[in-house]
Image: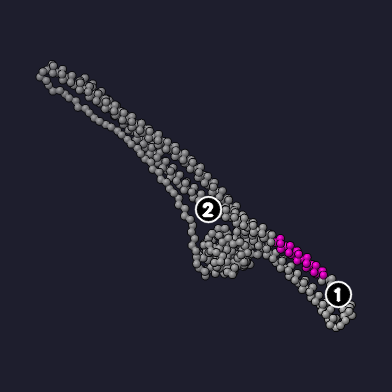
C-alpha cells in the first residue's frame, strides 16, 4: 500500500513538473517574439522620425520658395506697370514727333515757295523795291526785310529740324528702356516658371513623405497590436501557470493528508497486534515550486529639426567697392546675351554682376531676384560704388554720381545708365 502511494505521488510530481517546463518555455518564446516586435516598432519609430524631419525640411524649403515666388510675381507686376507707362510715353513722343515732322514739312514748303518766287522774280523784285522806295533809308529797310525773311526761314527750319531730332532721340531712348523692361520681364517669368516647377516637385516629395508616414503609422499600429496581444498571451500563460501551481499545492496537501491517514492506520494496527511496538518506517516528502513573470518595454525617441535663418554681414570696404565698379566699367560696349555670364562674349544683367564680383572672390546668386537679398540693405542716398542697385527683374552696379553700369539689352549691351531710370527696389551692400 505504501509503495503504491509513493508511486502515485512521484507520477504526479513528474507530470506537473513537465507541465511547468512546457509552460515556461512557451512564455519565453512569446517574450522573444515580443522583443522582436518591439525592435521592429523601435526601428519604425526611428524611420518615422527621419521621415518627419525630412518632410519638415522640405516644407521649410517650400515656404522659402513660396516667398520668392510671391516676390517674383510682385516684380512681374511692377515690370508690367512700368512697361505700360513706358508705352504711353512712347505714344506721346510719337505724336510729338509726327507733329514736328509736319511743321518741318510745312515750313520747308513755305521756304521753297519764297525761294522759288525770289528766283523767278529775281532782279525785278529788287528793282521793284528800289522803285517803290521813296528814299534811300526806306529802300535799305525793305532790303533788310527781305534778308531777315530769308534768315527767319532758315532759323525756323533749323529749329524744327533740331526738334525733330530731339524727339526722335527721346523716342529711341524710351524704346531702349522699354526693351530693358521687356528683358527683365522675360527673366522674371522664367524664374517664375522655374520656381513653380521646383515647388511642384517639393510638394510631390512632401506628399510622398505623407504616404510613407501613413504606411509606417499603419505598420506601427499593427506592431502595437501585436505587442498588446503578446502581453495578453503572456498574462494568460502566467495565470495558467499560477493556477497549475495552486493545483499542485492542493494535490500535495491532499496526498500528504492521505499518507498521514495511511501511516496512522498502520501504526494503530501494529500497536493492536504488537503491544511491544516496533520501528515505524516513515516517509518525508515535500517540495514547493513557483513561477512568475513580468514584461515591460516601451521606448520611443522623438526628434526635432531646427531651422536656422541665414544671416548676412555688412561689409565696409569702400576701396574694394570702387575697384568692383571700375572693373565692371572695363566691359562697357560688350554684348548682352540672355542667360550668359561671359563679360567679353556676352552676359545678362545678373550674370554680369555675378561675374564681376566673382573676379574679387565674392559669390553672388545667379538670378537678379536672389541678388536682391544678399549683403545688407542701405538707402539709395547712402549708395556708394560697388553696391548693387536692384530693380524688378534687373540689377546693376553703382559706380557713383547717380549712375550704374549694367548689362542692359541686346541692342545696347553693357552700358552706363542713370541709376534712377527705373523704380529702385533695393540697394544691397556686399562689400
Instruction: Kindly tell me whether residue 277 is visible in this rendering.
Output: yes
Badge 2 crowding class, 10 Å Cα cut-off, few under 14, some 14 to 19, many 20 or more, is: few
Most extreme residue toward the bottom, as rendered? 136
**Left or right of 260 on screen, residue 46:** right
Residue at disc 2, secondary structure: helix
Most extreme residue toward the left, as rendered? 276
Extent of the magenta region: 90-110
Badge 1 crowding class, 10 Å Cα cut-off, few under 14, some 14 to 19, many 20 or more, is: some
At a point 88% along the width and 75% down the height, the residue shown is 121
Q: Position of residue 323 (x, y in %)?
A: 54, 69
Q: Position of residue 266 (x, y in %)?
A: 17, 19
Instruction: Kindly tell me whether residue 22 is visible in this rendering.
Output: no
Helix, strand or loop for the magenta stretch, by majority:
helix
Look at mark 2 in the image and give the residue it sits on: 64
Instruction: Please say whether residue 106 is one of the residues in the magenta stretch.
Output: yes
Residue at disc 1, secondary structure: helix
Amino acid at each position: 500500500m505504501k509503495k503504491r502511494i509513493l508511486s502515485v505521488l512521484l507520477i504526479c510530481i513528474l507530470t506537473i513538473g513537465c507541465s511547468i517546463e512546457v509552460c515556461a518555455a512557451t512564455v519565453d518564446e512569446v517574450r522573444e517574439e515580443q522583443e522582436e516586435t518591439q525592435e521592429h516598432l523601435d526601428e519604425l519609430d526611428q524611420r518615422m522620425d527621419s521621415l518627419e524631419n525630412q518632410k519638415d525640411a522640405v516644407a521649410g524649403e517650400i515656404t522659402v520658395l513660396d516667398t520668392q515666388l510671391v516676390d517674383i510675381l510682385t516684380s512681374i507686376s511692377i515690370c508690367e506697370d512700368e512697361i505700360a507707362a513706358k508705352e504711353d510715353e512712347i505714344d506721346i513722343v510719337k505724336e510729338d514727333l509726327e507733329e514736328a515732322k509736319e511743321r518741318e514739312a510745312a515750313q520747308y514748303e513755305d521756304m521753297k515757295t519764297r525761294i522759288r518766287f525770289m528766283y523767278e522774280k529775281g532782279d525785278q523784285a529788287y528793282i521793284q523795291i528800289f522803285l517803290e522806295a521813296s528814299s534811300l533809308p526806306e529802300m535799305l529797310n525793305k532790303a533788310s526785310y527781305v534778308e531777315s525773311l530769308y534768315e527767319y526761314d532758315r532759323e525756323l527750319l533749323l529749329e524744327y529740324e533740331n526738334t525733330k531730332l530731339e524727339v526722335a532721340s527721346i523716342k529711341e531712348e524710351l524704346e531702349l528702356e522699354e526693351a530693358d523692361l521687356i528683358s527683365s520681364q522675360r527673366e522674371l517669368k522664367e524664374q517664375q516658371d522655374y520656381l513653380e516647377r521646383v515647388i511642384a516637385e517639393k510638394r510631390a516629395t512632401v506628399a510622398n513623405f505623407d504616404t510613407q508616414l501613413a504606411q509606417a503609422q499603419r505598420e506601427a499600429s499593427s506592431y502595437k497590436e501585436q505587442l498588446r496581444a503578446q502581453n495578453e498571451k503572456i498574462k494568460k500563460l502566467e495565470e495558467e501557470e499560477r493556477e497549475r501551481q495552486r493545483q499542485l499545492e492542493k494535490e500535495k496537501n491532499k496526498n500528504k493528508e492521505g499518507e498521514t491517514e495511511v501511516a496512522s492506520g498502520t501504526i494503530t494496527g501494529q500497536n493492536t497486534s504488537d503491544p511491544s511496538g516496533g520501528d515505524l518506517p516513515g516517509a518525508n516528502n515535500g517540495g514547493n515550486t513557483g513561477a512568475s513573470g513580468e514584461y515591460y518595454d516601451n521606448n520611443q525617441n522623438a526628434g526635432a529639426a531646427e531651422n536656422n535663418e541665414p544671416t548676412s554681414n555688412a561689409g565696409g570696404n569702400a576701396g574694394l567697392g570702387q575697384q568692383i565698379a571700375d572693373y565692371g566699367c572695363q566691359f562697357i560696349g560688350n554684348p548682352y546675351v540672355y542667360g550668359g555670364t561671359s563679360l567679353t562674349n556676352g552676359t545678362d544683367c545678373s550674370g554680369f554682376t555675378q561675374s564681376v564680383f566673382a573676379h574679387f572672390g565674392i559669390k553672388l546668386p545667379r538670378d537678379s531676384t536672389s541678388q536682391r537679398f544678399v549683403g545688407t540693405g542701405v538707402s539709395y542716398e547712402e549708395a556708394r560704388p560697388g553696391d548693387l542697385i536692384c530693380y524688378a527683374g534687373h540689377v546693376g552696379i553703382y559706380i557713383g554720381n547717380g549712375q550704374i553700369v549694367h548689362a542692359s539689352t541686346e541692342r545696347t549691351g553693357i552700358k552706363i545708365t542713370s541709376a534712377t531710370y527705373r523704380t529702385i527696389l533695393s540697394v544691397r551692400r556686399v562689400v
